[in-house]
Amino acid sequence: MPFKKVIEVPEDVSVEIENYKIKASGPLGALEKELKELERFDEIKIEKQDNKIIVRIEGKERRKVKAMAGKIAALIRNAIKGVKEGFTYKMRIVYSHFPIKVEIKDNEVIINNFLGERTPRIAKIVGNTKVEIKGQDIIVTSVDKEEAGQTAGNIEQATRITGKDRRVFQDGIFIVEKPK
């Protein structure tokens, strides 16, 4: 049975595929992804028929080719979901020793007074991601799943504790809810 993935495109979303680029636009904005992996795999073909996108393999189905075709189908699916619904990560500020102060300046999240440290810890905001602080919660939203996930990861890693007992020092900013 030949490999074939069919992706439905909703009516309010438009998807264009040119060379090695995917352009999706919808109610929440536009997203452009470059698929450089396709240059190495000639067997993978992407077709657009009406409101469907078909990713299939022509020729021999090797494991690497099948994996890459699945990855490309997932990227297209995520792009469609991103411009239609968006991706939201919810994070929580937790402290027991020193109250953590978090603020946003330019493209950075600045974390002050973490474990009583004098120098602030800084996490980079990637791409067009929006970060909101609501009390003890931080909400990271974007149309690009990779950018939203990387920004949430950067914030979480900025408050990583080294050199202290994790059972005692449980302070930090943690991801509590991920998009599905």
Image: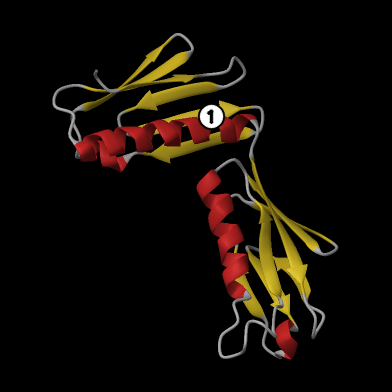
SS under mark 1 = helix
* Residue lying farthest to the left in this orientation: 60
Which quadrant: the N terminus? top left
Quadrant of the rendered image containing residue 5: top left
The amino acid type of the residue labelled 1 equals Ile
Extreme front residue here? 167
- Work out which quarter of the rendered image holds the C terminus and state it: top right
Judge whether 128 appears above or below 52 on screen. Answer: below
- Is residue 126 visible from the viewing direction of this image? no
Residue plotted at (39% across, 31% down): 73
**Which residue is located at x 61 percent, y 90 percent?**
164
The x, y position of residue 28, in whole percent, is: 66, 33
Q: Is residue 95 left or right of residue 84?
A: right
Q: Position of residue 104 (x, y in %)?
A: 72, 66
Mark 1 surroundings within 10 Å by alpha-carbon count, few (fewer than 14), some (14 through 19), many (20 or more): many
Relative vertical location of residue 39 with respect to residue 171 in this rendering, above or below: above
- Image quadrant in which you'd find residue 139: bottom right
Q: Closer to the camera, 70 or 49?
A: 70
Q: What is the residue that sits farthest to the right in this orientation?
A: 135
> Which one is in front, 107 or 91?
91
Q: Residue at x 29, y 38 (%)?
A: 68
Q: Position of residue 140 (x, y in %)?
A: 68, 53
Where residue 30 sits in the image (x, y, percent)? Answer: 56, 34
Q: Which quadrant of the structure image shows residue 119? A: bottom right
What residue did someone put label 1 on? 80
